[in-house]
Amino acid sequence: MSCQDFQRQIVLDLYGELNEGEKVGLETHLYQCEGCRQAVKEQSEFSSTLASEASAFDFPSDLLVESRRALADQLDQIERKRPWWRIPTFSVVFTPMRMLESAALIAMGLAFGVYISNQQTVPAPAGANAIAETLPQNGLVSNVRIVSADSSTATVEFTGDIVQPLRFTGRIEDDTTRRLLFSAVQDSMNPGSRMQAVEVLARESSEPSVKEVLIHAFLNDDSLGVRLKAFEGLKPFAGDEQVRNAFMQALMSDPNDGVRVAVVDALAPFTKNEAAASSIAEATKYDDNTYVRLKGQGLIHTVGAQK
Amino acid sequence: MEAVLRRAEQAGYDTDEEKLLIEQAQSGNREAFEELVRKHDRDILRLAFHMLGNREEAREVFQETFLKAYRSLNRFRFESSFYTWIYRIATNVSLDHLRKRQTLKEEISYESDTESNPDRPALKDTLAATTYYSNPERRLYGREVGERIQEALKTLSEKERLVFELRHYQGLRLRMIGEIMGSTEETAKNYLFRATQKLRAQLGKV
């Protein structure tokens, strides 16, 4: 096979679509071909850029709600137009026992209705008005849960989160701004916001609290785009022990090839001794990505040669 | 994104719970059908939005896909996974929309015929109003790289675009993509490689 043929294998390998035999063939070639090793690296970076860009703009959040609603309307229409003989069937067998059961259910329903209507309305608990005032006029109450419902007093107890519209301008180094940015980094519903917040925070990554948030996002965020932005902020501190530990963890566990390629490259200049080189070699020994594996193993030789 | 990929990895198999839902939906249980919709609608909407690039058409594809599924659910015989089946419908509907759009482009001149149809907006204006980056959310995150990627994606053939979308963004395995396309894994591999090469040639170093 020529280098030209291996280009196809490199792309398929990055997508995890090569079988074991093909992988071994590719690896053998990569050991001896600097050009193809470079191609692996470039292709990994290219794939990561494409993926991170996509994760930053998922479909608008309201589109799903809108689409679901429109579909439900369409289904309603279909069901209304459906002739009666095609309406889903259910069993209506009038056995004496079934009729007795039905009568009992109707009687119980009536009795319950009379009981409820005879109950005096219980005054709203003190403080209800105060809560009502805090309910946002144009905001949302989310995560509403019914804690308890007591039919004898006709009261319901709720818990929930009040979400109000907010507009705020502040300097990045201000405490409030930071807290808002930290909240945005944790907004699990909105990868776009998380990415923007991480991008802004990355400019202040020398701050310990910011560094901690970036490390958390880098190691835990589902969105590749967010992880890569966090990585950019942390990269200048690859020599710092806390960041280095995070990078080592990502090297062993991040599912994205591009991230691991970037991490192994970022760690290389700060790997000055054999112990550090060995730990990277160990972490990359079984990596699926050929570039990461070769680069990781190669660091031992680089450090050895520098001695 | 990784969550999408993880979900896609598990998607080739119907669980017992899903089988039960399908059977209930087949016997006319609307709630069971809606439960099935909920399990897959994010993936389908994501595919439609990426393929068509605007919310109106994405919503149409979403609706058409699930309505077709609803109408032909009785013909689903568990020969493939439900996920593959619904994706097959969605990809066909998406491709139909892309083809319709292409036909429209050919039929209507790019500039408006202002003399005979003064009220009709120019197609270029219509397209500009509905493309991916006219959406404020897109504009916000897309920036230059995003726009270049979208332009590059337009240079791919329908099938290349579809395979790239399903593998790269939706995380489906090429074997499943082959099934969805009614083709083979090897063909899907070729489309993926060609798509990647074309994109790199278009984008250079992004």
Image (cartoon, grey):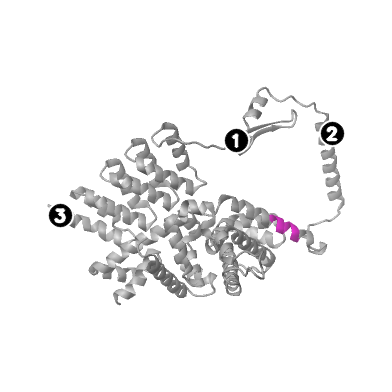
Q: B48 or A6: which is nearer to us? A: B48
Horizontal and vertical percent for residue B24?
68, 59
Residue A69, above or below B88: above
In the picture as drawn, the residue positioned furthest to the front comes out as B115
Residue B26: horizontal and vertical position, in percent?
69, 63
Q: Which residues are the magenta region?
A: A72-78
Instruction: Report the residue marked by disc 2.
Output: A114
Identify the mark nearer the N-term, 1 or 3. Answer: 1
Mark-to-mark CA distance, 1 and 3: 60 Å
Please give the label number shown on residue A304: 3
For label 1, the residue is: A160
Chain holding disc 1 = A
A237 in relation to B62, above or below: above
Q: Is residue A77 magenta?
A: yes
Question: Is residue B81 among what the camera can see?
Answer: no
Q: Residues within 10 Å of mark 1 (few under 14, many from 20)?
A: few
**Camera-nearest label, 2 or 1:** 1
